[in-house]
Image (tube, helix red, strand yellow):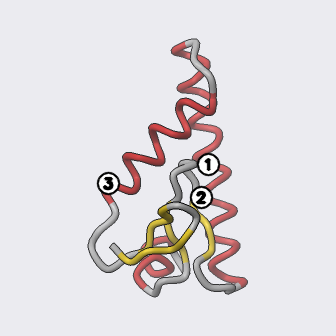
Amino acid sequence: MDLQTAKEQGLLGETASGYLALVQNNPEAAKVAASVNARRKAEYQSIAQKNGIALKDVEQLAGKKAIDKTPKGQFVQADGKWVKK
């Protein structure tokens, strides 16, 4: 399973924290999320370090961008609840 498939099937969604989270419990989707989130965190840390800003600020900005880019019909987390965009 890849990220695109997991998101299209409604198994994973974007969060305001800049990371993916499980919408439905699925072991394969959980592995995809863990892998993608690890890569994202490394990238966010690099950006934060280069710009002398807090990791949390980079995560929040990335989360907003990811939610904005999420196609219609996929899940995003709003106020702690999953919403189909």
> 25 or 33, which lies in front?
25
The local secondary structure at tag 3 comes to helix
Residue 22 in percent (x, y) is at 62, 74
Q: Quadrant of residue 19?
A: bottom right
At x 37%, y 46%, the residue is 65
Identify the amino acid type marked 2. Answer: Val
Evaluate if marks 2 and 3 touch, with contact meaning CB atoms under 8 Å apart. Answer: no
The vertical placement of 52 against 71, above or below, is above
Q: How many residues crowd mark 1 within 10 Å: few (<14), some (14–19), many (20+)?
A: few
Evaluate if marks 2 and 1 touch, with contact meaning CB atoms under 8 Å apart. Answer: yes
Whole-angstrom CA distance, mark 2 to mark 1, is 5 Å
Residue lying at the far left of the rendered structure: 72
Residue under label 3, please give it. Answer: 68
Quadrant housing the C terminus: bottom left
The local secondary structure at tag 2 comes to helix
Instruction: Indicate which disc, 2 or 3, sits on the residue closer to the N terminus.
Output: 2
Residue under label 1, please give it. Answer: 39
Residue under label 2, please give it. Answer: 36
Residue 41 in percent (x, y) is at 64, 42
Numbered disc in front, either 2 or 3: 3
Identify the amino acid type marked 1. Answer: Arg
- With 10 as the anchor, is 25 left or right in this view? right
Identify the amino acid type marked 3. Answer: Asp
